[in-house]
């Protein structure tokens, strides 16, 4: 049995942020052409990471800081959260983070002081949030699943697409191809039901 952490699937662009340079890349490994539209959110990420690491022993910043953040970037699919980044995961070439489980990496992200997005609250524009990763019972998942259409209707767009389930003990897998599938991440989209 491999327990799973769940998160809501946001309707945005999967992107990666290189922390030191704040450059953004799409899932095809190319520079994100609209990166300037996330300037405020990128700066918020930079400050949160910097402050979070200083509070936990800033002298180790260069060695242990996650150099890449996996984010959902919201800008053009709808008007909610425009210019905002929603942090999903992080990775680094060092074995301390690269070999860490998804659960441990999310714990690391929680320690950075990023604001966790409350799924029933409209997101602000030009912000940087952490996507909540949670363990849930079937009953809790059904409750959220059933609430998604109502929230989307209330907010006037398809903001949430469904769920993402990630094996809590999984290691980060570098995706050398955007079409590559991994067994430890499963997406459940409402429109595919």
Image (cartoon, grey):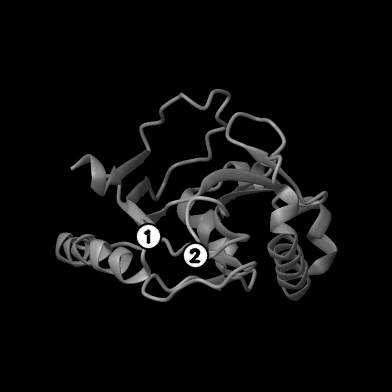
Left or right, residue 12 beside residue 26? left
Camera-side residue of 153 and 137:
153
Looking at the rendering, which quadrant does residue 183 occupy?
Answer: top left
Tell me: residue 70, above or below residue 57: above
Left or right, residue 113 beside residue 2? right
Q: Is residue 185 visible?
A: yes
Residue 105: which numbered mark, if any?
none
Camera-side residue of 10 and 78:
78
Q: Residue at x 24, y 68 (%)?
A: 150
Q: Residue 131: horizontal and vertical position, in percent?
A: 48, 62
Q: How many marks?
A: 2
**Mark 2 Cα shell of 10 Å, populated few (<14), some (14-19), many (≥20):** some
Residue 80: which numbered mark, if any?
2
Q: Marks 1 and 2: CB-CB under 8 Å?
A: yes
Tell me: residue 85, above or below residue 117: above
Q: Is residue 65 visible?
A: no
**Mark 1 Cα shell of 10 Å, populated few (<14), some (14-19), many (≥20):** some
Tell me: residue 114, above or below residue 74: below
Residue behind mark 1: 157
Looking at the rendering, which quadrant does residue 158 occupy?
Answer: bottom left
Q: Earlier in the sequence, mark 1 or mark 2?
A: 2
Q: Residue at x 49, y 48 (%)?
A: 101
Left or right, residue 49 beside residue 119? right
Question: What secondary structure is found at the residue carrying circle 1?
Answer: loop
Question: What secondary structure is found at the residue carrying circle 2?
Answer: loop
Camera-side residue of 134 and 191:
191
Q: Residue 112: horizontal and vertical position, in percent?
A: 64, 69
Q: Residue at x 68, y 39 (%)?
A: 25
Q: Residue 120: horizontal and vertical position, in percent?
A: 36, 74
- Image quadrant occupied by the N terminus: top left
Q: CA distance from mark 1 to mark 2?
A: 8 Å
Q: Residue at x 35, y 49 (%)?
A: 164
């Amino acid at each position: 049995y491999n327990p799973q952490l769940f998160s809501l699937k946001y309707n945005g662009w999967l992107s990666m942020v290189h922390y030191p340079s704040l450059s953004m890349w799409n899932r095809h490994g190319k520079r994100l052409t609209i990166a300037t539209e996330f300037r405020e959110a990128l700066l918020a990420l930079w400050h949160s990471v910097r402050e979070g690491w200083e509070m936990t022993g800033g002298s180790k910043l260069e060695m242990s800081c996650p150099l890449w953040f996996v984010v959902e970037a919201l800008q053009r699919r709808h008007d909610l959260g425009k210019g905002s980044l929603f942090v999903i995961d992080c990775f680094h070439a060092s074995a301390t983070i690269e070999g860490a489980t998804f659960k441990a990496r999310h714990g690391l992200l929680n320690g950075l002081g990023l604001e966790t997005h409350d799924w029933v609250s409209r997101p602000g524009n030009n912000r940087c949030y952490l996507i909540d990763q949670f363990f849930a019972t079937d009953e809790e998942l059904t409750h959220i699943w059933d609430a998604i259409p109502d929230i989307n209707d209330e907010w006037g767009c398809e903001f949430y697409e469904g769920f993402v389930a990630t094996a809590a003990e999984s290691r980060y897998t570098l995706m050398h191809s955007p079409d590559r599938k991994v067994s430890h991440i499963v997406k459940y989209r409402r429109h595919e039901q």
